[in-house]
Image: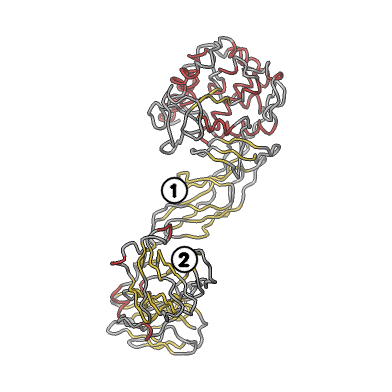
Amino acid sequence: MNKKITFLLLWITSLIFGQIPAGYYDDADGLSGYQLKSALKSIITNGHVTHTYDELYTAYETTDSDYYYENDGTVLDMYSENPDGQDPYNYYHNQNTCGTYSSEGDCYNREHLMPQSIFDSALPMKSDAHFVVPSDGKVNNMRSNYPFGEISDPTWTSLNGSKVGYNTTAGYSGKVFEPIDEFKGDIARMLFYVATRYEDEIPGWGASDMLDGSGDQVFTDWFLQVLLKWAAQDPVSQREIDRNNAVYDYQGNRNPFIDHPEWVNAIWNRDPDTTAPTVPSNLSVESVNDTSINIVWDASTDDTGVDKYEIYVDGTLNGDTTATDFTIINLSPETSYTICVVAVDAAGNASACSNNVTATTTQAIVYILNENFDDCPTMEFTPINEASDKDWTCMSQYGEDNSPSIQINGYQEDVNSKDWLVTNQPINMDNYFNEKLSVFFSYTYGTTPLELLYSYDYDGNGTPWQFTWTAVPNVDIPVPAGETSAVTYQLTDADLSTLNGTVYFAFKYYSNGSPTRWTVDSFKLAGDTTTSIDTYVSNQIKLFPNPVDKGQLIQINLNKLTLNSIDVIDMTGKQILHLTEKEHLVIDTTPLKSGLYFVKINTTQGQATKKLLIK
């Protein structure tokens, strides 16, 4: 064995067993099942000093201080701790103890993981620090006397993600409380302590959906499965080890399931599941963009059932899911990633990694035009008045999230209003691919529609009505129906990839005698750039006419460039034509189907790709 690994294992072993008193568990040697449990009951009852309920607050100074996450010595509350970032609130020991409360963060008190109403608040259970822990008062109240369980659709969620809702574990459908994953094993081992320390008393306790009324198994079948699962999935942590030692110093007994976590299965799961799920198969990449990769795979099988799939990216755990697909997010553009999937069952058995797939994220989406109308003097649009004394007006509100916007107000019915809002500069769509448009709209009153148009021939000189305008594809702006309250509409990622060449965009408002107040905000035109396009070469090459009617001839003018080859490629990537003629070229579209094509032009000076639309 590697010496470093050997040292690490010895170090971990010393942490777990280093402070267990010599001979403490000798009477449990060689035992298993409920005999082991009864032996442990005698061991951890002997020496147990009963303290008062009020003394718990003093005990928490050593048993439940945060030296593991923020490392600030505040009260470590499993119901409010955020292990991955800043806590939503903190408590200092012996300050802000409850008292009254109405919200999270008001005060903290003492939470009995096994509700004290079940044992009539009797000592020593009521003050046993092994399972009575500090907790925010509000969350403690929301937990109520509910069993612990697992929830898919919470009815209430705390600020750290603990939940109240209906149980999804087979065998019980009532309301339960689910802590965050970080502390599920901690809570399970605390409740196994309760079942052991008080096995003689438990048959006389009150009814609970967690308890089966016996002193041996103690827990109902469904609840036992939850605890076994949590104990397996969340192994003993250094925080638990330190807490166990501190409680031992305080009240003279230990939690054996922290010292020997294997005893959980030795008592309650004598035939533990040791069979790993089958390896997930046929892992493949379904889609890729600049910051995410979506993957799919075939389900694994298991003798007791697959609990989750873990997704590894470049060897590091990225996330998990119960489904057979997953979207990996927050990736870097133009970066290659190697991915595999591992199946895990409820006992924590893990399969080998699936087949690896490698995917490369696309080039970053760039904004061709991104106008939020926050600064009207420098906006990317020009208001143009064709008829009437009204115009588009910058507003300090009414936009998306009530941000600044641009608005054309409802006019009097006798005013013949014709107004335009036109982009300041033309946009060369040939410099981008996969163009997407998003816009926020709001409208009130009247029935006058708002049109979103584009023009190939507009000259930018302020008389847009004298030129040819066409409706922007895949944009269907609602027509007002006289609403007296504002109606919002969000256009999201409309596909503009069929547009080519240089275009202007414009909003056109022609009053129809029933005027409408229109608001526009967050005009975002995005597209992919490509490093294979040489801007100079692209600007030299002309395809005309484009768009073209099927059957027409297309002229290709290379100007002074020297041709190597031209390829016409359809949307599936299939090469349709390959041409090598010199200088001026003609493409006959008769044999081509209607649709969008890419014309890849290789010259000795560089390469360009043009979009071609055959109608």
x then y, percent, for residue 262? 58, 25
The quadrant holding residue 38 is: top right
Q: Nearer the viewer, residue 346 or 602?
A: 346
Question: Which amino acid type is marked by label 2?
Answer: Ser
Q: Nearer the viewer, mark 1 or mark 2?
A: 2
Examine the rendered structure and indicate whether residue 279 appears above or below residue 581. above
Q: Nearer the viewer, residue 159 or 339?
A: 159
x then y, percent, for residue 396? 36, 61
Q: Residues within 10 Å of mark 2 (few under 14, many from 20)?
A: many
User: Residue, x 52% and y 71% (percent of image)?
Assistant: 478
Disc 1 and disc 2: Cα gap in Å? 45 Å
Q: Which residue is mark 1?
A: 314
Question: Which amino acid type is marked by label 1?
Answer: Asp
Question: Which secondary structure, mark 1?
Answer: loop
User: Residue, x 40% and y 88% (percent of image)?
Assistant: 586
- Residue at the limit of the structure toward the bottom, as seen here: 552
Q: Nearer the viewer, residue 63 or 305?
A: 63
x then y, percent, for residue 33? 67, 22
Q: Residues within 10 Å of mark 1 (few under 14, many from 20)?
A: some
Horizontal placement of 521 versus 615: left or right?
Answer: left
Q: Earlier in the sequence, mark 1 or mark 2?
A: 1
Q: Is residue 18 visible?
A: no
Residue 354: assigned label? none
Q: Which residue is mark 2?
A: 442
Q: Is residue 403 visible?
A: yes
Horizontal placement of 580 versus 156: left or right?
Answer: left
